[in-house]
Amino acid sequence: MDTLIKSQQQNAVDTFPLKGTDHVEFYVGNAKQAAFYYQKAFGFNLVAYRGPETGHRETVSYVLQQDKIRLVLTGALAPEHPVAEHVRLHGDGVKVLALWVDDVEYAFRTAVARGAEAYEAPRTLEDEHGTVKLASIRTYGETIHTFVERKAYSGPFMPGFEVRSNWGTVPDVGLKFVDHCVGNVELGGMDRWVKFYQDVMGFKLLVTFDDKDISTEYTALMSKVVSNGNGYVKFPINEPAKGLKKSQIEEYLDFYRSAGVQHLAIATDDIIHTIQQLRANGVDFLRVPDTYYETVLERVGAIEEELEALKQLNILIDRDEEGYLLQIFTKPLQDRPTVFFEIIQRKGARSFG
C-alpha cells in the first residue's frame, strides 16, 4: 500500500469539537526530580503544585508550562496507590492525554453513546478562581482522555493546585505546542483504535503508512494518523510488522508492558536554536550516519537552512507536496526504552516524516 494523505473537506461539520490539547499527565516514580529535569533540560516553567502542603495527601503533582505546552508530573506517596502501581508496571509514562473542550457534558455523553468506555463521569472542581469541569474515557492500554472545560476558571491550573515558581533560571528553548502524540498498540490493534477515533470522536484518517513505507532490512512498522476536525489534535497509531529482528514498537510494548503513548512531538519555530540549547542542556538524541546528508537534498529539494548546520545537529529533513519539515528524536526520557520526545519544525509540510 502506498503512503496516503487524505484531504479533509473544509466545510465538514465537526461532530466532536476539540479546542486542542489541554495537558499531558505523566505518572512518574519521583515527581519532584522529574519536574526539575524537565525544567532544566527542556526549558519548562514550574507554574503550579498540588501535594501534602496544599491538603492533598495521596499524590504530588507538578505543573510545567512552556508556551502552549502543559505537562503534569504526578507521583504517589504510598506504594499501594494506583499511581505507584502504574509506575511499577510501566515505568514513567503518559497516563492522561487531556483534551480542551467547550462542553464536558456533551463530550463525555457523546463519546460514551458512540461506544467509549467511561473512566470517570463528569465532575466539577471549584475554588476562589472559578470552576473546572472534567470527565474521562478509556483508550488504548491504560491511557485515558480527560475532557477539560475551563472557560470559567482563572487560576494557575485547576482547583486544588497552588502557584509555584521555578527552581532557579530556566533556559530559553523555544518549544511552542504539541504537534502530535503517537500511540503504540499491539499487533492487529491499529485498525481497531483508528476506528475508535473515527467512530467515537469524529476523527478523520489523515495518513497511512504500511510496512513498505517504514522499514529496514530487519524491522518494520505500520502506522495510521487520525486528526480531529480543526487539525489541532493528531494521533498517529503504530503497530509492529513482521521483520527479521524485534521492531522498535515491539521493544516498547515489551518494556511498557501494554499499549501506550510512545512519544510527544513538540513544535518549534527555530529548530536549530532549540536543538543547540537542548544539547547544551544535556539532552541526548538519536543519531543518523553522516552519509544521510550526502544525498538528502536530492530527495527533498531546496531548503532555507544551511545543510551543514543541520548535519552538525543531526536534524532530519523530509518533504511533502505542501513543503518540508525538520525533525529530530530524543533518546528515551527514562530508564526503560519507552517514552521519548520528537522536536519538529514545519516549513509548510503537513506529513510526519
Image (cartoon, grey):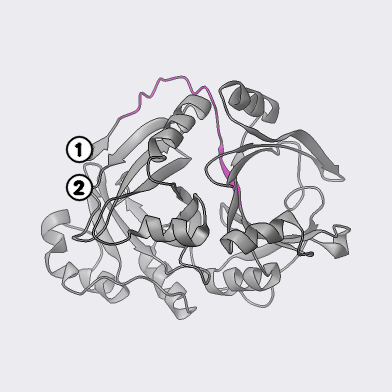
Q: Check disc 1 and report the residue beneath it.
A: 1
Secondary element under disc 2, as helix, strand or loop, is: loop
Any part of residue 301 in sight: no
Of residues 51 and 166, the one drawn nearer to the viewer in this rendering: 51
| Mark 1 residue crowding within 10 angstroms, few (<14) / some (14–19) / many (20+) | few
The part of the image, by quadrant, that contains residue 247 is: bottom left
Specify the segment rendered in magenta.
Answer: 7-24
At x 41%, y 44%, the residue is: 237
Q: Is residue 92 left or right of residue 61?
A: left
Image location of residue 167, percent across then percent down: 69, 75
* Quarter of the image that includes the N terminus: top left
Image location of residue 318, percent across then percent down: 24, 54
At x 70%, y 57%, the residue is: 83
Q: Check disc 2 and report the residue beneath it.
A: 212
Image location of residue 76, percent across then percent down: 74, 62
* In the image, residue 270 above or below residue 321: below
Would you say residue 54 sits in the magenta stretch? no
Secondary element under disc 1, as helix, strand or loop, is: loop
At x 42%, y 40%, the residue is: 189
Would you say residue 17 sits in the magenta stretch? yes
Decide whether the magenta segment is chiefly helix, strand or loop: loop
What type is the residue that disc 1 sits on?
Answer: Met
What type is the residue that disc 2 sits on?
Answer: Lys
CB atoms at circles 1 and 2 under 8 Å apart? Answer: yes
The part of the image, by quadrant, that contains residue 153 is: top right
* In the image, residue 132 above or below residue 331: above
Of residues 310 and 195, the one drawn nearer to the viewer in this rendering: 195
Decide which of tag 1 and tag 2 comes sooner along the chain: 1
Q: Alpha-carbon distance for marks 1 and 2?
A: 8 Å
Image location of residue 81, percent across then percent down: 76, 57
